[in-house]
Image (cartoon, helix red, strand yellow):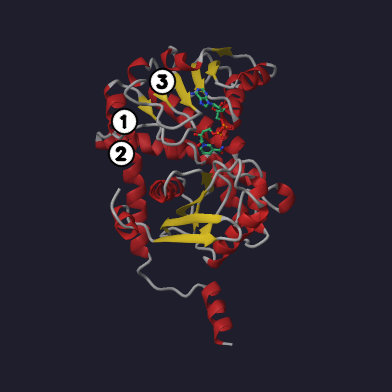
Amino acid sequence: MNEGVLANMREFDHEQVVFCQSKEAGLKAIVAIHDTSLGPALGGTRMWAYTSEKEALRDVLRLSRGMTYKAAAAGLPLGGGKAVIIGDPKKDKSQALFRAYGRFINSLDGRYITAEDVGTNVFDMECALLETDYVVGTDPSHGGSGDPSPYTALGTFYGIKACLKKVFGDESFKGRTFAVQGIGAVGAHLVRHLVKNGAKVVACDIDQDKTNALKEEVQFETVPADDIYKVKCDVFAPCALGAVINDRTIEFLNCRIIAGAANNQLERNDHADIIKKRGICYAPDYVINAGGLMNVFLELEGYSRVRCERMVQSIYYNVSKVLKIADEMGVTTARAADVMVEEHLQKVRQSNRMFTMHPKNVLRNVHRRR
Ligand code: NAD
């Protein structure tokens, strides 16, 4: 981490970082807008008991950049942004805090649109919504699209299908074995899709209640959490935490494909090289897990479940494209995804050089002149 905010912003080319403070409301927040070449920056608000401002800044810069890549890979007209609230989500929340936060979001005039993330929930976002329209992913009773997890799972399912086609020449799930790590909001939906489509599933979760509840609905085997890496399977689907492909676990992997919903699955970039050398096909996390983002994006355009389901299917195409680029360039799939995104961003930035007066801007200028 560099000294100074601007030096850190320059490292990954962030556009804007906003520090927000309200003593009365107990708010300390940082909003990072990484890139708005494609559209307004969208990304969730994380609340975490960071031990220092430096740690919070590092997290928000890393996460906001990730959102630029996820939106671009999904073909959405959105930029990348993220916000962090420094505080303990179990102790420091209040309606006043999220209302104050909402006012700061509003002051950005739509350059950043927020949603829930780790440590925040729909209720928190509805408090922010009292002060700003730039919130998505709220409850359907407030005009939102609700829980995005089913769409993240559905998109992951389509992405796995693309990997099966590439590796086995056949995209059928029937008779294939899947090892699913984590059966929370996304993992449980994924297990349902897999079992429904004839797959054999071995899953694990550190929360026994979740395992028991899902077992009442669908048939699958379970293993202790640490044994999931060793399961001989066609597809390993990480749906729990990040950095699960690391120096400790990589040698145990006994699969042909790694394709799951968890964010930041590779601990380091060179783990992608090791996976490639071992002949394992990896679906880059930010390409395969974009279904939830597509779901909230559609709120901005007029939400419909049918439209969302159709859009999420495009993840099959997006993952296939990345696998093809990796083959053509002889690089890892992780690198291929980055190349695909960076080329897309570059092309759109070049087209932005042509000035047009959008009708919305004309109207805004008319109002300002009055
Ligand atoms: P969740 O908290 O509902 O589920 C995660 C599950 O993993 C929990 O049941 C937890 O008990 C379990 N778990 C934690 N550590 C484990 C371990 N070591 N071994 C086995 N199980 C373990 O979260 P979620 O919303 O289902 O998200 C899962 C992953 O997908 C996260 O990495 C998240 O960032 C990512 N993701 C989620 C969405 C979404 O729409 N929810 C969108 C994009 C990415």
Residue at which label 3 appears: 168
| Residue at the farthest bottom position | 370
Residue at which label 1 appears: 272
Kind of residue indicated by mark 1: Ala
Mark 3 residue element: helix
Mark 1 residue element: helix
Given residues 189 and 139, the one toward you in this image is: 139
Q: CA distance from mark 3 to mark 2?
A: 22 Å
Residue 161's label in the rendered image is none
Q: Is residue 138 visible?
A: no
Provide residue 124's location: percent of width, then percent of height.
64, 49
Kind of residue indicated by mark 3: Phe
Pick the quarter of the image with the C terminus.
bottom right
Residue at which label 2 appears: 335
Q: Earlier in the sequence, mark 1 or mark 3?
A: 3
Q: Earlier in the sequence, mark 1 or mark 2?
A: 1
Quadrant housing residue 149 = top right
Mark 2 residue element: helix
Q: CA distance from mark 1 to mark 2?
A: 8 Å
Quadrant housing residue 23 = bottom right
Residue at horizontal 52 percent and vertical 46 percent from the top: 46
Residue at horizontal 40 percent and vertical 23 percent from the top: 257
How would you rate the neighbour count of disc 3 (Cα within 10 Å): few for under 14, some for 14-19, many for 20 or more? few
Kind of residue indicated by mark 2: Arg
Q: Earlier in the sequence, mark 3 or mark 2?
A: 3
Ligand 1 is within 8 Å of the C-beta of the residue at disc 3: no
In contact (CB < 8 Å): disc 1 and disc 2: yes
Q: Is residue 108 visible?
A: yes
Ligand 1 is within 8 Å of the C-beta of the residue at disc 2: no
